[in-house]
Image: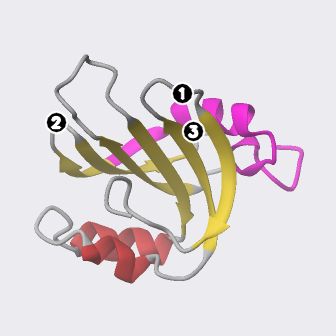
């Protein structure tokens, strides 16, 4: 890589999202039909990400709101996430990434335009904020 910062962490949200989509799946922590938590690793630079996906089912017409949050995490945080029982206690995620930090936020609300942006704030679990 010739630059100091990989595309996955760059300010261009669309390029970052595409780089993260191509990331290697390391481990799934929760795999439910409407809530998925996994750890990814960028193939370009090796940066690890905690990926959270939540679909809020309303049983009305199939256009259910969906949110994906992807937060960069350190190697130490990856190890702690791997040993935590995230499926039994979602707070294990918040304990590990409790401080304000930058994350990629992709919100697909029902009947409205999508939002894709880098946010800097305390991480939340989609659908549980």
Nearer to us: label 2 or label 1: 1
Q: Is residue 102 magenta?
A: no
Q: Secondary structure at mark 1?
A: loop
Q: Which residues are magenta?
A: 1-26
- Quadrant where the N terminus is found in the figure: top right
Image location (x, y in percent) of residue 46: 59, 52
What percent of the width, then of the height, locates residue 127? 33, 53
Picture quadrant of residue 77: bottom left
**Residue tagged by mark 1?**
112
Residue 10 falls left or right of residue 115:
right
Residue lying furthest left: 88
Reading the image, the residue beneath label 2 is 33
- Label 2: element kind: loop
Q: Tell me where residue 17 appears, x and y as whole percent.
A: 62, 35
Residue at image location 64% in from the left, 39% down from the top:
116
The question of residue 2 being in magenta is answered with: yes
Dot in front, 3 or 2:
2
Residue that protrudes farthest toward the top in the picture: 61
Residue positioned 61% across, 50% down in the render: 104
| Placement of the C terminus among the 4 image quadrants | bottom left
- Front residue of 65/123: it is 65
Instruction: Indicate which disc, 2 or 1, sits on the residue closer to the N terminus.
Output: 2
Q: CA distance from mark 2 to mark 1?
A: 23 Å
Disc 3 secondary structure class: helix
């Amino acid at each position: 890589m010739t630059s100091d910062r990989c595309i996955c962490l760059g300010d261009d949200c669309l390029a970052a999202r595409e780089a993260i989509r191509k990331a290697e799946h390391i481990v799934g922590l929760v795999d439910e039909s409407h809530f998925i938590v996994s750890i990814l690793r960028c193939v370009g630079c090796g940066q690890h990400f905690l990926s959270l996906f939540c679909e809020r089912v309303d049983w009305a017409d199939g256009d259910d709101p969906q949110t994906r949050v992807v937060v960069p995490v350190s190697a130490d945080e990856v190890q702690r996430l791997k040993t935590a029982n995230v499926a039994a206690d979602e707070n294990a995620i918040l304990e590990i990434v409790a401080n304000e930090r930058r994350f990629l936020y992709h919100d697909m609300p029902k009947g409205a335009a999508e939002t894709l942006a880098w946010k800097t704030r305390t991480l939340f679990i989609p659908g549980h904020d």
